[in-house]
Image: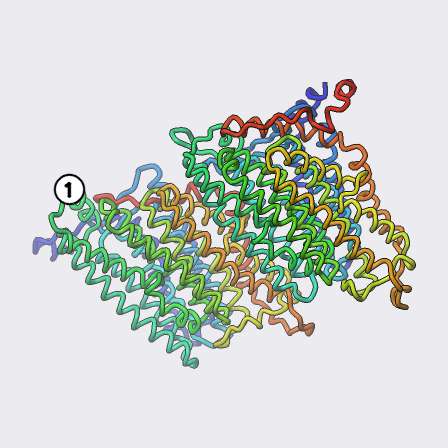
């Protein structure tokens, strides 16, 4: 029944195209608004971003649960002479990232005041939303590359235009790092399409290319490396992570939130969709290296985060650690680890997005992010401290909150296939507690200075924009099933694809942990 | 004519219709000169600009007619196969006429501002354009050389016309000496081609090379090398690029735009016609050399560009780097590669015309320091955004024509299994992007808060910038029309 509805809606209304187009239209309308009414810009932008967010929720509601393939597909001919189509679709892996993108952007638009030039600020954020949707939805390699690279421009402009002192350096570094990564990916994209073509027409269709698997082993491995380089820089993984602390620290709050919540996911999503799916054999071949780099990221990110003096930089390094977990989950190739990886992408978006938002609020109040200049804020701003505690505990991975579910799935899934990696990564969980609790202690507890006592508490509006994050964090911690049951078919399908095209076999580790618990009752819904 | 026929001389049949675009341009040049000589008082800039624009429009209407002829009746040639009428020649004719119109519009403001006599400038520009068209259409090396000289001599004088500036004269002398030098290479190459194949006509050359297997092809190799060197000077490929930064910097901005776009495009037209069309059977001999040239041009152009502090010099090296991209496409020695090169040249020409429109309007002094662009994003937001689009297009960012152009070049290289060259091209694009980002950052991120007095922009300049930006985005979002145009424009040598 649900499938039927989904199929009907997919054929009648190209909702995924609308997702990409609505923010673009919004950006154009914002640009056309008169400059004399600066107060209109953000509300109008937020309306369009919210429409897109509502559409993403509609996609989620109409998504048929137990189906592995791509849904809501829409194909339009774009550049027929080069075999390029506008081809979008969504599956269990991209669904939640789309929802996350849809919800984060309006929240950010409402929450963060740019202080100057609201028009371009709003327009760039809307274009960023459109580009991120495009990148998560694209099923044509060319379209994906276009979207993957075009999102750099709004983020670059946001960092450059509204960032802090060193923004010029940070924005340029961010742009060049990502562009350098994707440079060879373009060569690989063309190579994959050309070499897979054979006697058939050239195509950039991801599904078709993944089915053909026409490349020789060595070529596929080289192409995989070119793809992986682009994604690894975006994730980022040690040793190509150095753009991230700078970009995060210098970016305005809105930029940091979207960068952490949405754009970093392009890397891990890319590894799943274009690494594992397009190059199954090469992924298995490269898995030990990438899993190792992921684990190094977990430990290194945690250690470096401990040493940070700047609260925002600390959160940025904690991002590296969290993303390392996701990479480990992806390259452990078990149902649980992949599910955990995908779930952790959402978790990280919620917790780190909220952390950046709150660090931004703190900066608005105190004009500093230095940990040593802050102390005892809890007494002056108890509600703020409460919100911060919940988000921080989610980031640490305390049971009952979302971070635990994701990390636990990653660890339990990876243990069978990557035992020692998992053992080392598990210590990262402890280190996360160390650096976050220590930072919390220094900033919120302790003797408040007169300045600290003046720190105003959360306003109602700030509380309202943070509430969705808290709700998400608690809900997913207590009841992750709605996510997992949509993720699982896609993940199982991916692993089956992997097993079919390489000599990898998933070890039998019994029934999946969370979803299967009450499988009988679930079918009644 | 009658007397000549009595002497037994029979001229070749001439398809005047095919020559009409150049004839109109030359006629307009003469008309401007005559009017200025006969007019009682100083002729206005507007008169010269309008005449040039009208001739460009009329010529392009005829070029469209010729295009229809080629589509329906197939390509042909005229004047004893010396002059080709194919998609290729019309493609470049259209491109050159667009460049002509844009340069006329840009020079309108410039000439007024600098007090340069407009009639001479416009007459030279028209002759230069006619020369470029001849160069792109020629099926005979001698005719090609004539076109090249007509193109270049016009440019030498146009650079030097700003006689109060010593830099302009220095530039002109530099360009003249090196231009003469490259002409010598080219002529020597033509002579050796004649020695090796018995003809300067490219149709004969191709037929001869198809039919004959050389026991010893040293002469032909030397001919190809010399032709390549001569044309590499014109398109500013490394290591024959040394004139480019100095000349670009010293020349008036509209002329720099003309050199960077049309002179380069005409040079590549000649290169493609000679090497891809005539020397096709010997591509194993020349393609590797072009590949090496392409890689060093890309690398040196990109690396040198980021070391500059003067915007015009930056753009000069970026133009060198773009020549490298086109060479990558030429290196593929395939129809794909050639149409990729044509697409690249078309979109690049329009980008560069728009870019130099902005540069020209930003200042006329000899120096173009980066700091002059500081705060442009605030004082002129629309034009700054336009300039940003043009710079991003040159960096090859998606949703601009520059990305589609880059993509096609990479696709051509990959199809040719030149993976290393494709990778090198993409990596140098990243190096080059740093330079474009630097300019963008300066425009938008400025520490000093003071608002500088923004000069009023002449509407002609704004028109060119807006048209260039519009086309750049259009061809970046829906490139199909231009891809088809470029695919129909692969050169064909027809015996007339």
Q: Which residue is mark 1?
A: B211
B420 in relation to B229, above or below: above
Q: What is the secondary structure assignment of the residue under circle 1?
A: helix
Q: How many marks?
A: 1
> What chain does mark 1 sit on?
B
**Which residue lies at the image location 67% right of the left edge and 37% below the top edge?**
A410
Drawn side of residue A484 relative to residue A297, left or right:
right
- Judging depth in this view, the residue of B202 and A1 nearest the camera is A1
A159 in relation to B455, above or below: above
Residue A212: percent from left, percent from top: 47, 28
Residue B469: percent from left, percent from top: 54, 55
B132 in relation to A58, above or below: below
**Which residue lies at the image location 85% right of the left edge and 49% below the top edge?**
A387
Colour pattern of the rendering: rainbow
**Which residue lies at the image location 33% right of the left edge and 49% below the top edge?**
B331
Drawn side of residue A283 relative to residue A113, left or right:
left
Q: Quadrant of residue B76?
A: top left
Q: Quadrant of residue B337?
A: top left
Quadrant assignment for the C terminus of chain A:
top right
Residue B107: percent from left, percent from top: 47, 67
**Which residue lies at the image location 41% right of the left edge and 36% below the top edge?**
A195
Residue B48: tell me if it is visible: no
Quadrant assignment for the N terminus of chain A:
top right
Q: Quadrant of residue A447?
A: bottom right
- Judging depth in this view, the residue of B326 and B430 nearest the camera is B430
Q: Residue furthest left?
A: B7
Residue density around tag 1, few if under 14, some if 14–19, many if 20 or more, within 10 Å = few
Drawn side of residue A449 relative to residue B442, left or right:
right
């Amino acid at each position: 029944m649900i499938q039927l509805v989904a199929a009907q809606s997919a054929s009648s209304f190209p909702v995924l195209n609308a997702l990409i187009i609505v923010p673009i239209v919004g950006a154009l309308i914002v640009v056309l608004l008169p400059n004399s009414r600066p107060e209109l810009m953000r509300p109008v932008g937020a309306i369009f971003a919210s429409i897109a967010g509502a559409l993403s929720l509609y996609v989620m509601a109409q998504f048929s649960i137990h189906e592995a393939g791509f849904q809501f597909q829409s194909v339009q001919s774009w550049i027929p002479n080069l075999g390029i189509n506008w081809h979008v679709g969504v599956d269990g892996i991209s669904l939640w990232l789309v929802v996350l993108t849809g919800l984060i952007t309006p929240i950010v638009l409402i929450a963060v005041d740019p202080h100057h030039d609201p028009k371009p600020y709003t327009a760039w954020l809307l274009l960023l939303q459109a580009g991120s949707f495009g990148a998560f939805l694209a099923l044509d390699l060319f379209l994906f590359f276009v979207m993957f690279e075009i999102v750099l421009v709004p983020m670059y402009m946001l960092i450059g235009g509204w960032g802090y002192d060193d923004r010029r350096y940070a924005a340029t570094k961010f742009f060049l790092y990502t562009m350098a990564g994707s440079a060879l990916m373009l060569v690989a994209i063309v190579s994959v399409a050309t070499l897979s073509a054979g006697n058939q027409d050239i195509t950039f269709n991801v599904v078709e290319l993944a089915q053909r698997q026409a490349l020789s082993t060595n070529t596929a491995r080289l192409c995989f490396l070119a793809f992986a380089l682009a994604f690894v820089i975006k994730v980022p993984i040690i040793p190509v992570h150095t753009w991230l602390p700078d970009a995060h620290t210098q970016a305005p709050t809105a930029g940091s939130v979207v960068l952490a919540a949405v754009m970093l996911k392009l890397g891990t999503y890319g590894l799943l969709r274009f690494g594992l799916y397009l190059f199954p054999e090469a992924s298995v071949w490269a898995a030990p290296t990438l899993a190792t780099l992921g684990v190094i990221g977990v430990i290194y990110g945690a250690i470096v985060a401990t040493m940070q003096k700047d609260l925002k930089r600390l959160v940025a390094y904690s991002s590296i650690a969290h993303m390392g977990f996701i990479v480990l989950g992806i390259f452990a190739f078990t149902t649980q680890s992949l599910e955990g990886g995908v779930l952790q992408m959402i978790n990280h978006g919620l917790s780190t997005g909220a952390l950046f938002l709150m660090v931004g609020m703190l900066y608005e109040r105190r004009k500093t992010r230095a940990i040593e200049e802050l102390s005892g804020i809890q007494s002056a701003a108890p509600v703020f401290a409460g919100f911060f505690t919940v988000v921080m505990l989610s980031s640490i991975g305390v049971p009952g909150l979302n971070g635990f579910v994701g990390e636990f799935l990653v660890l339990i899934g990876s243990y069978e296939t990557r035992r020692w990696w998992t053992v080392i990564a598990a210590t990262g969980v402890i280190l996360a507690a160390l650096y976050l609790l220590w930072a919390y202690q220094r900033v919120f507890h302790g003797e408040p200075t007169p300045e600290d006592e003046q720190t105003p508490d959360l306003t109602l509006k700030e509380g309202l924009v943070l509430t969705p994050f808290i709700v998400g964090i608690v809900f997913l911690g207590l009841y992750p099933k709605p996510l997992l049951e949509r993720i699982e078919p896609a993940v199982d399908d991916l692993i089956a694809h992997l097993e079919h095209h390489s000599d990898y076999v998933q070890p039998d580790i019994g029934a999946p942990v969370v979803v299967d618990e009450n499988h009988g009752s679930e079918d009644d819904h | 004519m009658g007397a000549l026929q009595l002497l037994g001389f029979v001229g070749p049949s001439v398809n005047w219709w095919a020559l009409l675009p150049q004839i109109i341009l030359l006629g307009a040049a003469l008309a401007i000169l005559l009017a200025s000589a006969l007019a009682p008082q100083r002729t206005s800039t507007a008169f010269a600009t309008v005449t040039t624009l009208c001739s460009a429009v009329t010529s392009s209407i005829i070029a469209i007619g010729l295009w229809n002829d080629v589509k329906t009746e197939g390509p042909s040639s005229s004047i004893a196969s010396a002059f080709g009428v194919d998609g290729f020649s019309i493609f470049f004719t259209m491109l050159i006429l667009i460049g002509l119109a844009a340069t006329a519009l840009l020079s309108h403001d410039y000439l007024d501002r600098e007090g340069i006599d407009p009639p001479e400038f416009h007459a030279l520009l028209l002759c230069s354009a006619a020369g470029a068209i001849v160069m792109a259409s020629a099926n005979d090396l001698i005719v090609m050389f004539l076109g090249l000289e007509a193109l270049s001599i016009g440019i030498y004088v146009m650079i030097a016309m700003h006689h109060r500036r010593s830099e302009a004269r220095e530039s002109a002398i530099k360009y003249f000496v090196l231009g003469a030098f490259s002409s010598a290479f080219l002529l020597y190459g033509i002579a050796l081609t004649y020695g090796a194949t018995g003809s300067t006509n490219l149709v004969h050359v191709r037929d001869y090379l198809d039919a004959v297997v050389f026991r010893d092809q040293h002469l032909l190799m030397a001919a190809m090398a010399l032709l390549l060197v001569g044309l590499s000077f014109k398109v500013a490929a490394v290591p024959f690029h040394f004139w480019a930064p100095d000349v670009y910097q010293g020349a008036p901005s509209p002329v720099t735009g003309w050199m960077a776009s049309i002179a380069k495009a005409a040079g590549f037209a000649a290169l493609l016609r000679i090497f891809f069309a005539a020397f096709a059977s010997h591509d194993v001999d020349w393609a590797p050399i072009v590949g090496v040239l392409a890689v060093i041009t890309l690398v040196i152009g990109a690396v040198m560009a980021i070391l500059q502090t003067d915007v015009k010099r930056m753009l000069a090296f970026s133009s060198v780097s773009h020549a490298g991209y086109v060479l990558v496409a030429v290196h593929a020695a395939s129809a794909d590669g050639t149409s990729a090169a044509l697409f690249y040249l078309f979109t690049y020409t329009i980008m560069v015309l728009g870019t130099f429109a902005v540069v020209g309007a930003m200042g006329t002094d000899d120096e173009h320091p980066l700091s002059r662009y500081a705060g442009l994003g605030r004082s002129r937001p629309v034009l700054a955004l336009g300039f940003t689009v043009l710079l991003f297009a040159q960096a090859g960012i998606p949703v601009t024509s520059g990305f589609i152009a880059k993509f096609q070049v990479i696709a051509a290289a990959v199809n040719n299994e030149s993976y290393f060259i494709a990778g090198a091209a993409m990596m140098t694009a990243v190096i080059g992007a740093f330079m474009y980002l630097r300019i963008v950052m300066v425009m938008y991120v400025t520490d000093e808060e003071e608002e500088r007095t923004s000069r009023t922009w002449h509407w002609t300049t704004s028109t060119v910038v807006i048209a260039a930006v519009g086309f750049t985005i259009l061809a970046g979002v829906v490139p199909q029309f231009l891809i088809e145009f470029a695919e129909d424009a692969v050169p064909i040598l027809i015996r007339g």
